[in-house]
Amino acid sequence: MKLVLLGANGQTGKLVLEAVLAKDIDVTAVVRSADKAPDLQHKSLQVMVGDPCDPVFLTSVFRDHDAVISALGGRLPSKVATSVYYRSTVAIVEAASVTGLKRVLVTSTALLFPNQTLLGKLLRFVVPNAVRSAGRMDKILKRPGPDWTSARAGFLNDVSVATYRAQREALPENSTAVSRLALAQFLITAISNSETQGAAYGVSQAST
Ligand SMILES: NC(=O)c1ccc[n+]([C@@H]2O[C@H](COP(=O)([O-])OP(=O)(O)OC[C@H]3O[C@@H](n4cnc5c(N)ncnc54)[C@H](OP(=O)(O)O)[C@@H]3O)[C@@H](O)[C@H]2O)c1
């Protein structure tokens, strides 16, 4: 297994990177500037610097890799910042079609699920750009192309808990929170879990 990790310097990305290296999985970590490269040395780690929304760059990264995990997400709720969801997905799908990369896993927002609590309904008005961009990402993934899984989270936190509940096409009941560590674990487990292919999964903390 050779994995590409986009957003490797982000908070969830860093945890995915640590977890895959602990399993000795070969990983190419992508960051958009050299100063954001992981401060790690590992025989299974390669780092590439470039724009994850550029299909030509991603094509050069994807060659000889089996799967990509994207932990990309806008750092602000603006239209421009949140557009990274769908712009990177366009590039991922194009590069996958050129290189034959077969598996795509992305992080997304649980605000896309239709059954929202009152708080969820309010949040959809607060961060409409993130919801729209994540929706466009989903539509792109649903076209014929690589096998995909979208991990949709509610509120991320940095609690040191790696367990989670995951539900197909819904956020598990009674919790909208999940740790980044648990989200990272879901993504890594889902790479080789064919049941998760072609679907969005709500990922929440294990106990409430
Ligand atoms: N925070 C929450 O409560 C929450 C809730 C639901 C879903 N999510 C989603 O969960 C995922 C992980 O969240 P997180 O808080 O761990 O992420 P994060 O720490 O904010 O990291 C975001 C990553 O995306 C990259 N990125 C952002 N804009 C980019 C652009 N225009 N071009 C290239 N790279 C760009 C960042 O790189 P740079 O350092 O170069 O900017 C960074 O690597 C994201 O998809 C997020 O949207 C978060």
Image: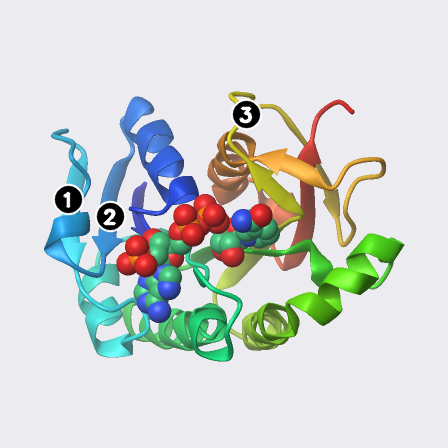
For this rendering, which residue is in front, 181 or 124?
124
Q: Is residue 71 above or below residue 98?
A: above
The residue that appears at 39% across and 70% down in the rendered structure is 88
Q: Amino acid at mark 3?
A: Val
Whether tag 2 and tag 1 are in contact, CB under 8 A, the answer is yes
**How far is the residue under mark 3 from the one under mark 1?**
28 Å
The residue singled out by tag 2 in the image is 29
Give residue 196's position: percent from left, percent from top.
Answer: 63, 47
195 relative to 161 in the view: left or right: right
The residue that appears at 50% across and 40% down in the rendered structure is 192
Q: Amino acid at mark 2?
A: Ala
For this rendering, which residue is in front, 23 or 145?
23
How busy is the neighbourhood of tag 1: few (under 14 within 10 Å), some, or many (20 plus)? some
Q: Is residue 121 above or below residue 83?
A: above
The residue singled out by tag 1 in the image is 46
The residue singled out by tag 3 in the image is 159
**How far is the residue under mark 2 from the one under mark 1?**
6 Å
Q: Secondary structure at mark 2?
A: strand
Q: Secondary structure at mark 3?
A: loop
193 relative to 31 in the view: left or right: right
Q: Nearer the viewer, mark 3 or mark 1?
A: 3
